[in-house]
Amino acid sequence: MVTRRREKFTTRVNPEILAAMRDLARSEGRQLQSLVDEALADLIEKRSGSRPRAHVMAVYQASHARYAPLYKKLSE
């Protein structure tokens, strides 16, 4: 879903949420637009199906590969 083309839209946002987003963007040295893009993409990914998100599964699989013997002992 990565694209360089941008489309302008207008919406209304809770002032506290907008202030928190601006603070977060400032603290991360990012533009507000990039946080909005990230938030919308995360929402779409989260709601697009019952499958776990790819980055969550990658972390799980890495953990399982590293700690499989420990997980097996814990299950006994």
Image (spheres, rainbow, N blue to C red):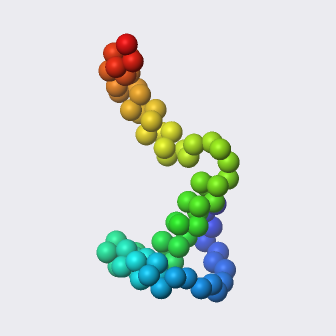
| Outermost residue, top side | 76
> Quick check: can you spot residue 29?
no
- Quadrant that contains the N terminus: bottom right
Q: Position of residue 27 (x, y in %)?
A: 31, 75
User: Residue at (37%, 74%) from the top-left corner?
Assistant: 24
User: Residue at (52%, 82%) from the top-left corner?
Assistant: 14
Q: Position of residue 17 (x, y in %)?
A: 46, 78
Up/down of 53 relative to 44, above or below = above
Q: Position of residue 58 (x, y in %)?
A: 48, 39
User: Residue at (49%, 73%) from the top-left corner?
Assistant: 34
Up/down of 16 relative to 76, above or below = below
Up/down of 34 relative to 44, above or below = below
Q: Position of residue 35 (x, y in %)?
A: 48, 71
Observer-nearest of 20 and 29: 20
User: Residue at (59%, 85%) from the top-left corner?
Assistant: 12
- Quadrant that contains the C terminus: top left
Image quarter of residue 67 = top left
